[in-house]
Image (tube, rainbow, N blue to C red):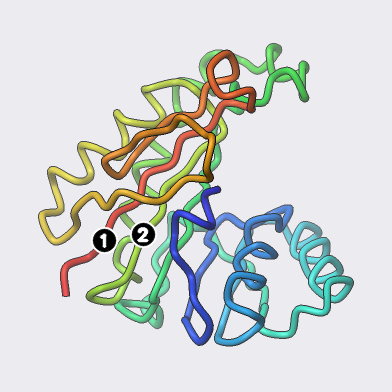
Amino acid sequence: LAVEAAGLTPGMRVLDCCAAPGGKSFAAAIAMQNSGSLTSCDIHPHKLQLIERGAARLGISILQTRLQDASRPAPEWESAMDAVLADVPCSGLGVIRKKPDIRYKPLDAIERLPEVQRAILETVSRYVKPGGALLYSTCTVRKEENEAVALPFLQAHPEFSLEPFPVPDGLDLPNEGYAALLPHKHAADGFFICKLRKHA
């Protein structure tokens, strides 16, 4: 759904800045019909190998991996991307039924996450070209990691605005550019999706 919200089309130049294990990158390549340029980043070399193997298995040829900390600037990408996917590190509380060990994460580590998320969003927003899209997403239901990160960013960056995104038929998820999927309401894991458009 996050990739669908981004509205990717063939020929785009796309960055997936926190890509491992690769699901969104693969969905992006499929949406792009394996045409264009797709860069998938992570900070762990072994995870990049997982992405590369998955891309080879699926016959995806437009995907390139890169070892990159999403919070550290990459000047060569400034204003170069048609779309940037930022599925940032998060507490994972939206998928706790699949990963019950999440409940044992230290609370202090969880409390530090919004700072990391803000740093990533601030950095990767610079890569979006005028007219391009920035997609911020998490797999948590904590507003501290969702609205409380995305909306202050929007206030500080008037060059971006919220853009409503389409959702599949039958999914009651109205949005004005951001929305939260909730397990008890949508029969899905907990996720947050926010789509921002950079003014041309």
* Residue that numbered label 1 is attached to: 197
Image quarter for residue 79? bottom left
Give the vertical position of 26 relative to 103 (above or below): below
Side of 172 relative to 42 (left or right) = left
Mark 2 residue type: Leu
Q: Residue at x 45, y 27 (%)?
A: 112
- Residue occupying image coordinates x 42% and y 41%: 117
Q: Is residue 115 left or right of residue 101?
A: left
* Labels 1 and 2: the sequence-earlier one: 2
Q: Callout 1 environment at 10 Å: few (<14), some (14 to 19), or many (20+)?
A: many
Is 183 displayed left or right of 115 in the figure? Answer: right
Any mark on residue 41, and which?
Answer: none
Q: Position of residue 199 (x, y in %)?
A: 16, 68
Element under label 2?
Answer: strand
Whether the residues at callouts 1 and 2 have beta carbons within 8 Å, the answer is yes
Of residues 1 and 82, the one nearer the viewer is 1
* Point 47% across, 45% down: residue: 167
Q: Position of residue 92 (x, y in %)?
A: 61, 28
| Residue 65 position (above or below residue 96) | below
Residue shown at the point (53%, 82%) measured from the top left: 10
Q: Amino acid at mark 1?
A: Arg
Q: Which residue is mark 2?
A: 134
SS at mark 1 in the image: strand
Residue 28, quarter of picture? bottom right
